[in-house]
Image: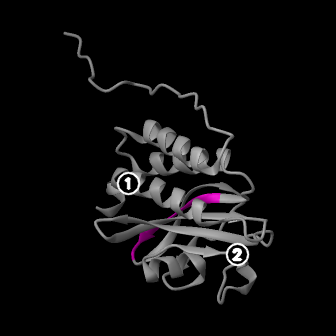
Amino acid sequence: MTRRSDRPTSRTMYQFDIAAGSKAELYRDLHAALDALTAGEGDAVANMANAASLIWQYLPDLNWAGFYRMVGGELVLGPFQGKAACIRIPVGKGVCGTAVAEARRQRVADVHAFPGHIACDAASRSELVVPVLLDGTVIGVLDLDSPEPGRFDEEDQTGCEALMALLAPRLAAMAD
């Protein structure tokens, strides 16, 4: 008797039509693409990897895009795009640790002016860190760095917060 699996052995790769128009259109298209990439996938690492890749590919002027996961009370490096990065960050330290301690986003126009900034890449000048919240608990952060001072604005913040709200339940395995 031949047994068929109900689960496909491979997923279809998507061609995304990401708008080159307004920033609002860009984030709307990124949201739709992230939804398509992660829908039905329960593996948190795979979902973070695809999210980091998608953001890296379509958001301009980034030199790092990725995730830190909460593991044992500290942030531990997750999937990312860019140069090698700091592996562990204590809660309350640097921009990422501050985002966790305060459970709110950190948008920093000049990282060199941020007290306690952790410089993983000396080329980084601005940073946006968005907590990934699941049932009110921080399970990780999205970390975006740019070599451009003041690169991130309120539209980036709002767009990335919406992306993380979509992604958070798809990372539930991290919270187990």
| Side of 124 relative to 42 (left or right) | right
Along the viewing direction, whichever of 110 and 21 lies nearer the viewer = 21
Question: Splitting the image into 4 quarters, where does residue 148 fall?
Answer: bottom right
Residue that appears at 41% across and 70% down: 71
Within-10-Å neighbours for mark 2: few <14, some 14–19, many 20+: some
Q: Which percent across, then down, holds residue 65? A: 63, 57
- Where is mark 1, residue-wise? 171
> Is 5 located above or below residue 74 in the figure?
above
Residue 48 on the magenta segment? no
The one nearer the camera, 22 or 141, is: 22
Residue lying farthest top?
1
Q: Quadrant of residue 63?
A: bottom right
Q: Main secondary structure of the magenta part?
A: strand
Is residue 113 depicted above or below 38 in this figure? below
**Residue found 52% across the figure and 79% down from its top:** 97
Q: Amino acid at mark 2?
A: Ala
Helix, strand or loop at disc 2? loop
Query: Disc 1 on helix, strand or loop?
Result: helix
Span shown in magenta: 65-72
- Residue 60 spot, x, y in % from top left: 72, 51
Q: Is residue 11 left or right of residue 4?
A: right
Residue marked by disc 2? 109
Q: Earlier in the sequence, mark 1 or mark 2?
A: 2
Residue 91 point in image, percent of width and height: 48, 82
Query: Are the residues at dot 1 and dot 2 in contact (C-beta closer than 8 Å)?
Result: no
Q: Nearer the viewer, mark 1 or mark 2?
A: 2
| Residue 22 or residue 6, whichever sits in front | 22
Which of the labelled discs sits on residue 10, or is there none?
none
Q: Which quadrant, please, contains the N terminus? A: top left
